[in-house]
Amino acid sequence: MKDVQALVFDVFGTVVDWRSGVARALAEFLPARGGAHLDPFAVADAWRRRYQPAMEECRAGRRPFTRLDVLHRENLELVLKDHGVDLASCTEADLDHLNRAWHRLDPWPDVLLGLSRLRRKYFLAPASNGNILLLANMAKRAGIPWDAVLGAEATQAYKPQREAYTRTAEILGLAPHQVCLVAAHNGDLRAARKAGLASAFVARPTEHGPAQGTDLVAEDPWDCVAESFVDLAAKLDC
Amino acid sequence: MKDVQALVFDVFGTVVDWRSGVARALAEFLPARGGAHLDPFAVADAWRRRYQPAMEECRAGRRPFTRLDVLHRENLELVLKDHGVDLASCTEADLDHLNRAWHRLDPWPDVLLGLSRLRRKYFLAPASNGNILLLANMAKRAGIPWDAVLGAEATQAYKPQREAYTRTAEILGLAPHQVCLVAAHNGDLRAARKAGLASAFVARPTEHGPAQGTDLVAEDPWDCVAESFVDLAAKLDC
């Protein structure tokens, strides 16, 4: 980690608790649209299951790069239909507000303190598949102190595409080994390492709810493994 | 201005005093390289005169979009040669540090207070020809509270190209008329207005030094004309 000058962060799951935040928005939305019997967490999980396949259309070149707000909105309409919600009963403003639940997610409790300490020594930016507006609105609402808002819209590539990592380093004027990805997902870190980045793992054992079975531990010898962002700051002498 | 949700800012000249900052860096650099007789302000002006022609190569399509740090560096070497500085006597680290004088510019005295008030009501971002790293390092050093770092590298277009304005609005999820450009340059505002944006003029009568003859007053009926960023905040009820 000695050459590292910038820390770039996976966001959904690593920085913020997307599942609780999306379920909270659905719990407000569904009852008035005939969905009082639906479990908001189950609908949140169904919405999230459509995330990777939608990005894969762009990665595979079957569709030009399309920002995540657009993919989320398409997926939302499909998920609501799947769950029997009558879209005709929803206004455009209702659907847009619900879609922007992804802009209103809360950080895990250790994030703000950890980042404020890490920021003294490192350049901090998201390396997320979220689009710029999504990440910036999230940061403004929660007070996340990014030095710049990067991510898929800046690199025009969706992780784990190699360019998502290498172009992030290029934008930062750094060689890949001077940039460290911080993520709660071993697969993301594997792709970052393959692209030459350093790697730090912070487990988020309840990202997918109480019964989570994946990404509970570091599966490879990552350059740093920490319990939380505050622990990461301590391990990096911040 | 009633529909405006985001304020986007020209940076060189409008937010920061580039001429004093670049001259300060040159005043440190030149004496040890046989340039003690040179006026750092004159060299700063010469460096800046190469700015528009370099971007024009990209605008005209004779060169692919190239971030400003790269254009600045090419121009720096030309300017130093023009002024008789022996480049062989400079290390790569010296030149890179000098080139990053553009990352270390100071805001005009009204900027931080004005932006901190405007930020409560509006989404704030640079709409500059600077690249992301340049603008982010400048903001981190000076404490400029951008909500996101946009600009030419995000839009892949150099002002006054229409796309520099319209793609900024797209990234923000807004229609052009919901975005207002704040600039000290009438030409920038004219191009922004043509692209559908709202316009606010703040004069910076010493951007080019004490004898400045351009952009001393608002030349068109802009949507807002203010004396400073603090006055702009007051005029926008922030």
Image: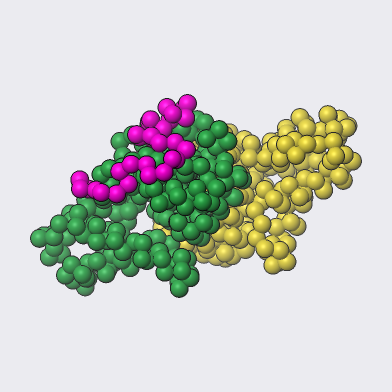
Chain colours: A yellow, B green
Residue occupying the point 59% across, 65% down: A162
Looking at the rendering, the stretch of residues picked out in magenta corresponds to: B209-238
The answer to whether B55 appears left or right of A52 in the picture is: left
The secondary structure that dominates the magenta segment is: loop
Question: Quick one: B66 or A41, which is closer to the camera?
Answer: B66
Quadrant in the rendering for residue B210: top left
Q: Nearer the viewer, residue A179 or B84?
A: B84
The stretch drawn in magenta includes residue B237: yes
Q: Is residue A7 magenta?
A: no
The image quarter containing residue B206 is: top left
> Image quadrant of residue A27?
top right
Say which quadrant the C terminus of chain A sits in.
Answer: top left
How many numbered circles are shown? 0
- Residue A186 visible (yes or no): no
Front-most of A190 and A170?
Answer: A170
Residue A20 point in image, percent of width and height: 70, 36
Nearer to me, B58 or B106: B58
**Residue at the spot x=25%, y=49% of the render?**
B213
Q: Residue placed at 33% from the left, 68% from the top? A: B74
Residue at the farthest front position: B220
**Image coords of residue A154 (percent x, y):** 55, 56
Residue A165, compared with residue B231, is above or below; it is below
> Can see residue A32?
yes
Give x and y (percent) for residue A8.
52, 51
User: Which residue is found at the position 38% from the left and 30% from the top?
Assistant: B231
Q: Position of residue B215 (x, y in %)?
A: 32, 46
**Position of residue A212 in the picture relative to residue B163 (left or right):** right
